[in-house]
Amino acid sequence: MANILSTGSGALIAFQRALATVSHNVANVATEGYSRQRVDLATRSPTDMGYGYVGNGVKVADVRRIADQLATTRLLDSGGELSRLQQLSAMASRVDSLISDKATGLSGVWSNFFDATTGLSSNASSSAARQEVLSDANALASRFKQLNSQLDSMGNEVNSGLRSSAEEVNRIGAEIARLNGEISSNPNHVSNDLLDQRDRLVSQMVGFTGGTAVAQGDGSLNVFTAGGQALVVGNTSAKLTTITDPYQPERLQLALESNGQQIRLNDTALGGKIGGLMDFRSDVLDPAQAELGKIAVGLAETFNKQHRAGMDLNGQMGTDFFNIPAPRTSGHAGNTGNASLTASVGDLSKLDAQNVVLKFDGTAWSATRADTGANVPLTGTGTAADPLVVDGVELVVGGTPGTGDRFLLQPTAGAAGGIGVAIDDPNRIAAATPVKAKAELDNVGTGKISGVKVTDSTNANLLTPADIEFIDGTQYTVNGAGPFTYTPGQPINANGWSLTLDGVPVAGDRFSVGSTGAGSSDNGNAILLGNLDDAKALGNGTVSLNNAIGGLTTQIGSAARQADYAAEAQQVLHDQAQAARDSISGVNIDEEAANMMRFQQAYQAAAQVISTADSMFQSLISAVSR
């Protein structure tokens, strides 16, 4: 009877614990990262009765956590990559919306400005038309500044995201290290829920940093970044911190502090949300801001050049229409010399938006791309007479550079934020061609003036009156100088202007060229200004300003779509990895219900065994008491 009672009570306890485990599984069916548990039952050691062994029932051998390390690792990998792509996609989509939306993009105000400039050519002396050009120019400059400011704000968001993410990674890392310590101190008796808790924390950390976790023999998990840097080793966690960029103090980078050392992390060292932020900054934000600045510089330089070739209503030569800042240069924080670089745009057609690192080796300068490290052609010595020339930018070196000193050249980054309209008086818009020509009334040939153009607005004699007199049909003089050969259909050039004739001049025919003067309604320069949006000013003379705007929109839109497509594809892979993990570790309600019924029946049977033992005992007591 004692055997029967012991066997029954042991079975009752075992099935009670099995039911409790099933209940625990059901209760956590919606708990993220929970791994179902299973009670492993085993027979108790039998008793040798002399004639043979008699069994002693069942016992709980283990409460096992159902998990597969391969499936967990796959889920970690896919989760970190998904976090990276989702972060990248979300931020890139915001830039795409900013640039492409009619309400916030460039296209609308850009068209308004050139429409107003074209409208000015219809009535060059109109005050209203001139004021409209200035108003639309200010609106365009404001839009450039607004877009650049929005992109700067996104850069600040990246900084904030890096700070907060580093703090969260440090918090999670410290907790993982603490759990590692608890688990490794007694690896054979570890709470399954504690292991799940640690796995959830590891998953959260990998969601921030990418990477993976490697199990150790003592039961602890070492966590590494996507670039292989250790974040948690045993019960010790490294500290992730933010540091300033050596060239741009306003920009934050990440570093790892471990064993008293600080290791600067490059953009590829981290995945997850942090990697998405850094990828967004380097692959979307920086190129967008640089390309926007390139368009602003292209517009200002091209418009200013043509505006300087015209004459305003006051009879003065045109000045710069737009103000625009010079290319940025900044020295490395570790430079030892006292040199500084002064940059200016030399050849607009060769201007490249890519950032360049300039390095002095003690005797000469070299240039490499900041993103890839590829060599960039560089000429010059850095003096005012012989400046350094790289990608259309000229640089004059001031002071004395130290050996190994480095400088970051940003040809167009942030330039859109500094553009402005340089004039505020409508009369100063140089809509007129500064020189005009006329034929003398007594000319007897058929030569007629078909066009006067300015070829060099800086020529000191541009506005000096000039008389052209033909000696015969093939020779002419200018203010008595010459004779010069005349070829029908070819322009006559002098003093920074050119003149084209239709027809055939004869000996004695005269033409005069002089300043257009104040108050002119001439629209020659306004026509040229209105067509500058189609001028192929960029890309070595192959890309127009209009095409550059379209290229910016396409570039950002393409980056946003690619990030979105990649995030959608990774979501599918992550869902598959999650399903694979859940098929092993997830709670199946139907299965648990079946187990509950099975263990309930077994529990009831064990109770019946105890009841039977009790009846047998009562029968024995009754028999003995008679």
Image: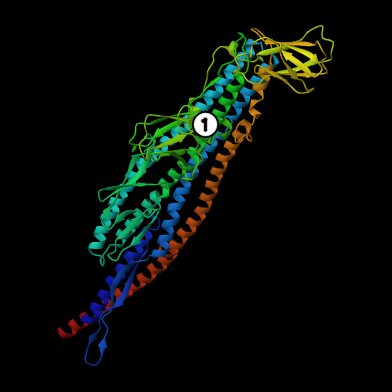
Residue 268 percent across, percent down from the top left: 42, 49
Q: Is residue 81 left or right of residue 626?
A: right
Q: Residue furthest bottom?
A: 51
Left or right placement of residue 283 versus residue 169 in this view: right
Question: Crowding near pointer 1: few (<14 within 10 Å), some, many (20+)?
Answer: many
* Foreground pick, 342 / 480: 480
What color scheme is it? rainbow
Does 141 sit above or below residue 411? Answer: above
User: Who is closer to the viewer here, 382 or 113?
Assistant: 382
Q: Secondary structure at mark 1?
A: helix
Residue depicted at x 79% and y 14%: 471
The answer to whether one can see residue 119 in this image is: no
Residue type of the residue flagged with mark 1: Gly
520 displayed left or right of 47: right
Q: Which residue is mark 1?
A: 293
The answer to whether any part of residue 366 appears in the image is yes
Task: Find residue 321 and report its image quarter.
Answer: top right
x and y percentages locating residue 517 in the rendered image: 65, 8
Quadrant including the C terminus: bottom left
